[in-house]
Image (cartoon, rainbow, N blue to C red):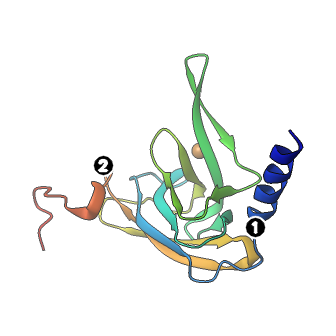
Amino acid sequence: MSRLLIAALALTTLAAPVAHAADQISVRQPWSRPAQAGMNGVGFLTIANTGKTPVTLRSAASPAAGKVEIHQSAMANGVMTMRRQDNGLVVPAGDQVALAPGGYHLMLIGLKKAQGAGQKVPVTLVFDGGRQIQVELAVQLAAPTAGGAATQAGHHH
Ligand SMILES: [Cu+2]
């Protein structure tokens, strides 16, 4: 029993977030949906952590919205609800977390102007230690397919 406890404590220590996230974070397929000015927009993307320590997405900001919050959608008694993630979003070491419809997402509160398909929405992701990553959400009607091998009509370059 005591041996188990020691092992658990050791794991907890190893899992403590470090002060800087270095170059261990990559962001894939950032996208958003069309929305009207004054409404709330969404931001979806996948954050991969190739490092040996967890990283935490603390906050996000965008010049396109009054403010940006990290939300989680969940079904509660048959009703879809959204909860703000005030403690941020942890991406475990060597793992990835998808912000996707029905789950985690960025909520762009109060869009300053309408965003239509084909436009890009700049967002700054702020991780623990103050490291920032700039992404551009591609505004589109449907989620991108994994690997980016989409063959949507009219989207060949
Ligand atoms: Cu939300």
Q: Is residue 40 in view?
A: no
Residue name at image x 75 percent, y 77 percent: 129
Position in image of residue 147 (x %, y %) = 27, 62
Label 1 CB-ligand 1 distance < 8 A: no
* Label at residue 142: 2
The N terminus - image quarter: top right
Residue name at image x 64 percent, y 66 percent: 60
Residue name at image x 66 percent, y 65 percent: 54
Q: Residue furthest right?
A: 2
Label 2 CB-ligand 1 distance < 8 A: no
Q: Residue furthest top?
A: 77
Q: Quadrant of ligand 1?
A: top right
Give neighbour class at mark 1: few <14, some 14-19, many 20+ (Cα, 10 Å).
Answer: some
User: What amino acid does circle 2 point to?
Assistant: Ala
The residue tagged 1 is: 17
Identify the secondary structure beneath mark 2: loop
